[in-house]
Amino acid sequence: MRKLLTDIRKEQKAKNVNFSAFLKLYNEKVLINEEKVDIRSYGSIRIVLEDENKNAYWDDISITSSKMDGLEQEIDSCVSSNLKVIERRKNKYSPLELTSSDVVFSPKATGYLIHEIIGHTLEGDLYSYYKDKYTDLKISKKLTVCDSVQDADFAASINKYDDLGIEVKPLVLVKNQKICNIMTTDRESSFDNKLYGFARRENYRKEVMSRMRCTYILPNENLNQENIMSKYNDAILMDKAYLGGVDVSTGNYFVEGTGFVLRNGEKQNVISNLRISGNIMKNLFLFEYIGNDFWLSGSYCMKLGHYLKVGCGGPAVSLNGLSVEGNVYESK
């Protein structure tokens, strides 16, 4: 691995591109009490490329024993895709601002979307303050959202027990056009008076909060990203998402990253500083397509000053009527 990363760094330096890789490996033994022990092992590598104008491009790759054989190939793929964007960003750009656009989210971007628009909204401490706003929420019949660490503990840094010793169990949050339950540490606020293991804290110096583990959209239709893109003559593709946020008091949210203009289903102009925004009360009904090309990854989430590793994911999806801002680069 060291040789691979060193070779990539030398190759990119010759192209005036700075390459860095940040490796994080964790192996924690968490003693809940004398009878309960949670073994939490996870890891990730962040690949970062920086062009001559100091613009940074990165990908987070989760590391598991089952993925080690394909890790080099995934790193090469990340480097290659980012280099293509760097090359196209050498062209002139113009500002883009759309008040109502069709947007396709790649599987890598879908996780950030659902993390913001559903995940934080249904965390028990936040939901308890604003639940009256969501009583008449209109939700697409195609949308099913779950939170589970089954086969995803590498992404969420939690395994059998939460930080209060409650057994970690999967939970369906949204299904059949309704909110089915919330992620809470309080049995009385749970819709079925049961706890599913959402008590988490950054460390034992901080208090427990209701936090996501690994939140994702379930596949729905026999479509992949390319199939969904082909449905649109004029749309936006969010290819990668880097950050997002939601104001649960209003339902306003945003997701930021990079993407492309879609013309006749094909990727055209690169978009940097891409910002997709909308409102939960309006947009959960506007899922037009939900594919089957599922992708799951881990990242870090800041909530009220507490920093935790969480997972998120889903297939490619598309929504109608979103606001879009960014910089569109010319094609040569």
Image (cartoon, rainbow, N blue to C red):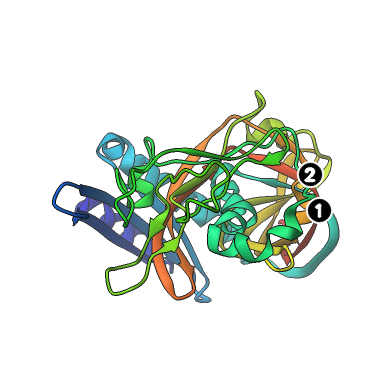
Identify residue type, mark 1.
Answer: Lys
Image point (29%, 42%), residue name: 64
Image point (24%, 56%), residue name: 25
Q: Do the residues labelled 1 and 2 touch (CB within 8 Å)?
A: yes
Asked whether residue 13 appears in the rendered view, the answer is yes
Asked whether residue 275 appears in the rendered view, the answer is no
Along the line of sight, which residue is nearer the eye, 87 or 73?
Answer: 73
x and y, in percent, of residue 332 in the image: 71, 56
Image quadrant where residue 322 sits:
bottom right
Image point (77%, 61%), residue name: 324
Mark 2 secondary-structure assignment: loop
Along the line of sight, which residue is nearer the eye, 21 or 7?
Answer: 21
x and y, in percent, of residue 103 in the image: 75, 49
Along the line of sight, which residue is nearer the eye, 262 or 194?
Answer: 194
* Depicted 284 relative to depicted 24: above or below: above
Q: Name the residue under label 2.
A: 285
> Could you say which disc has been placed on residue 282 in the image?
1
x and y, in percent, of residue 41 in the image: 24, 49
Horizontal arrangement in the rendering, residue 41 relative to residue 210 (left or right): left
Horizontal arrangement in the rendering, residue 300 relative to residue 22 (left or right): right
> Spatial distance from mark 1 to mark 2, Cα to Cα?
7 Å
Image quadrant where residue 331 sits:
bottom right
Along the line of sight, which residue is nearer the eye, 74 or 177?
Answer: 177
Identify residue type, mark 2.
Answer: Phe
